[in-house]
Image: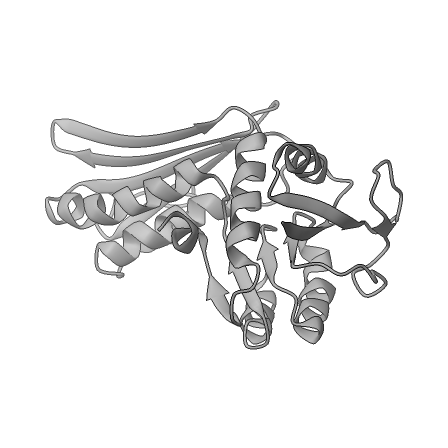
Amino acid sequence: MTRIIMHGCNGRMGHVIADLAKEDPDTEIVAGVDAHGESTYSFPVFASLRECNVDADVVIDFSNAQAADTLLENCADRALPCVLCTTGLSDAQLELVKKASQKTAILKSANMSMGINVLLKVLRDAAPILSAAGFDMEIVEKHHNQKLDAPSGTALALADDINEAAGGDFDYVYDRSTRREKRPQKEIGISSVRGGSIVGDHDVIFAGKDEVVTFSHMAYSRAIFGKGALEAAKFLAGKAAGMYDMSDVIG
């Protein structure tokens, strides 16, 4: 049984994961952390991880970037593994992630969906072939109108993977409205759509002469991210200090 502290338990994903954990015989949410400390759960909820005195094997974090610093410091101090799902981290916070991983296991992923992470594996094979054949690479991501960061962490992860696979010398372009020129070959365009209640759609487009290849992933429910987070938590519990990602989970 993997004992989990849910960091950000009162958020949308916190509720999703708590419900999913009830149906998973191998996991148990033993405590929650929320800035307001309010609880509608059977497990205790604390205002901060430092105040949480419940023994656990791993933390799942679905909070926000503002809470990341304290979370990482506390996980490092307690040698408590952390599945870090919050996106929109600054460069300084990413350095904190690396520093914390020297003391405990950290699994960081821009997207916890098993489907997205299989897609990343496929793209690492497709990108070098298609880019070498002259295909332009573009990413379009769509999310609900409450999402704070743009582009999405998943879109950037997709861009990083296809960029690295294709040689690593592509520039990212988020807006072409200020220039008037033909599209350079060595760029990856990333476009963001925000509207309604879109859970998360990502299209990776390879546009060549007379043909287009598109890899798409559509999320119809936040449950897919919760299921992936629980699988990641079960994987990470008991692991040695270091950096991990969902590719380690799916094998």
Q: Is residue 124 visible?
A: yes
Give the residue displayed 36% in from the left and 39% down from the top. Answer: 139
Observer-nearest residue: 109 or 51? 51
Q: Is residue 176 visible?
A: no
Is 216 positioned to the left or the right of 232 in the image?
left
Q: How is the image coloured?
A: one colour
Q: Is residue 20 above or below residue 7?
A: above
Expressed as whole percent of the image width and height from the top left, the position of residue 247 reads 39, 52
Expressed as whole percent of the image width and height from the top left, the position of residue 53 reads 83, 62
Expressed as whole percent of the image width and height from the top left, the position of residue 59 reads 66, 56
Q: Residue 83's quadrant in the figure?
A: bottom right
Q: Residue 104's quadrant in the figure?
A: bottom right
Q: Is residue 197 above or below residue 183?
A: above
Give the residue displayed 26% in from the left and 42% down from the top. Answer: 122
Is 147 positioned to the left or the right of 10 in the image?
left
Observer-nearest residue: 56 or 76? 56
Is 92 positioned to the left or the right of 14 in the image?
left
Numbered circles on residues, count:
0
Q: Is residue 119 above or below residue 44?
A: above
Expressed as whole percent of the image width and height from the top left, the position of residue 60 reads 64, 51
Observer-nearest residue: 14 or 4? 4
Q: Is residue 30 above or below residue 222?
A: below
Q: Residue 102's quadrant in the figure?
A: bottom right
Give the residue displayed 22% in from the left and 54% down from the top. Answer: 166
Give the residue displayed 76% in from the left and 49% down from the top. Answer: 30
